[in-house]
């Protein structure tokens, strides 16, 4: 680079004032000082390392004075500029590499060196493209520079990886069967009475409650029975829903699901979800408890709630008979969770 300029009044001072220029380059949208030296004396040629720029700005400098004496310091001032000479290298500038029309995954601000350049991230970008396009046989590699000098690719090497198989999402954890579903509300009023009488449920005895039809759109979601296992081992049984048939549970269950209770000395409320919420509108329905292994005691009380029509028991394949104790209106302790219609 060479800058030629002279003071505006040549010969006014002897020797003439020193002159120079402060240079800046426009690179990637920013004005940057010329490196490594941004101030040049005029009339001399200076060489610099290769740099990328799209514009050049020169601020003219002239030697200042104080008290009619030269200070030796160059300050901005007017000069008669004659020419600025530049010699350019033939190196591609601001190389960028991208896959297709995606943003570049690699860019280099400096000129491309003659010794070549390792493009970091190439294998990762290609593997990502192949993962997104499993059937692709060609990867569109877009190599661009900011100037028009020729670019040669001497060697290409990338270790490609087979795309990993699609991850199988983890199966959702099973929903707890011994807890109410979210959004349930209680169908029956709570009771805090201490039970004194229980009805036996085992391989030869069953007990059941008949309830009024649910409102249209309301679904039974869970039930809670006050039970005790009087044995020494876990008792296992079945809860089932039945339509009403002449005042007794129909022979075929609408739905059934297992229930289990460990041995214990005191009665406890046992919650059990239905396999799926079920509408029970239009006619009365029955909840029946049986035990196939061991025995269960389903506790009974008086003052039957309005929504419970009847409480019955049966032995073997015999008829269903109404509970007669405790008088005057016996029922089996039950809480029920229902889901209202969705808006």
Image: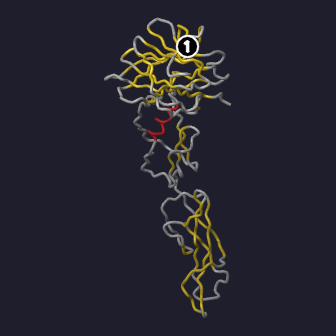
Residue carrying label 1: 242
Q: Nearer the viewer, residue 112 or 120?
A: 120
Residue 82: % across, % down: 65, 71
277 vs 128: above or below = above
138 on left or right of 77: left
Relative horizontal placement of residue 159, taking residue 250 as reference (left or right): left
Q: Quadrant of the C terminus?
A: top right
Q: Residue 236 placed where, x, y %?
A: 39, 19
Residue 222 image position (x, y, % from top left): 53, 26
Quarter of the rendering containing residue 247: top right
Residue appearing at x 36%, y 26% in the figure: 262
Instruction: List the single residue furthest toward the bottom.
Output: 67
The vertical placement of 179 against 5, above or below, is above
Residue placed furthest toward the front = 328
Q: Is 49 drawn above or below residue 104 in the view shown?
A: below
200 or 27, nearer to the observer: 200
Q: Residue at x 62, y 25 (%)?
A: 306
Number of dots carrying numbers: 1
Image quadrant occupied by the N terminus: bottom right
- Between 254 and 106, the one nearer to me in the picture: 254
What secondary structure is marked by label 1?
strand
Q: Residue at x 58, y 58 (%)?
A: 27
Q: Residue at x 57, y 87 (%)?
A: 15
Tell which of 116 and 127 is nearer to you: 127
């Amino acid at each position: 680079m060479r800058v030629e300029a002279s003071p505006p009044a040549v010969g006014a001072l002897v020797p003439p004032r020193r002159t120079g220029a402060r240079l800046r380059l426009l690179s990637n949208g920013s004005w940057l000082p010329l490196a490594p030296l941004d101030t040049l004396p005029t009339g001399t040629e200076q060489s610099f390392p290769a740099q990328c720029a799209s514009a050049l700005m020169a601020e003219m400098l002239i030697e200042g004075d104080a008290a009619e004496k030269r200070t030796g310091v160059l300050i901005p001032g007017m000069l008669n500029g004659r020419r600025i000479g530049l010699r350019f290298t033939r190196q591609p500038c601001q190389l960028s590499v991208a896959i297709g029309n995606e943003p570049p995954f690699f860019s280099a601000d400096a000129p491309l060196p003659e010794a070549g350049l390792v493009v970091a991230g190439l294998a990762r970008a290609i593997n990502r493209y192949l993962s997104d396009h499993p059937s692709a046989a060609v990867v569109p590699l877009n190599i661009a520079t900011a100037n028009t000098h020729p670019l040669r690719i001497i060697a290409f090497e990338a270790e490609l990886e087979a795309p990993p198989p699609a991850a199988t999402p983890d199966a959702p954890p099973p929903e707890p069967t011994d807890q109410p579903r979210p959004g349930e509300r209680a169908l029956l009023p709570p009771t805090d009475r201490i039970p004194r009488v229980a009805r036996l449920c085992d391989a030869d005895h069953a007990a059941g409650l008949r309830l009024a039809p649910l409102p249209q759109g309301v679904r039974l979601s869970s039930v809670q029975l006050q039970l005790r296992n009087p044995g020494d081992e876990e008792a296992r049984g079945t809860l089932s829903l039945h339509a009403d048939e002449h005042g007794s549970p129909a022979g075929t269950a609408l739905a059934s699901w297992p229930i289990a209770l460990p041995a214990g000395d005191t009665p406890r409320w046992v919650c059990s979800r239905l396999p799926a919420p079920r509408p029970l509108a239009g006619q009365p329905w029955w909840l029946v408890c049986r035990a196939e292994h061991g025995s269960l005691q389903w506790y009974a009380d008086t003052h039957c709630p309005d929504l419970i029509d009847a409480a019955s028991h049966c032995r073997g394949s015999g008829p269903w008979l109404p509970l007669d104790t405790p008088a005057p209106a016996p029922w089996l302790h039950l809480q029920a969770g229902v889901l209202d219609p969705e808006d």
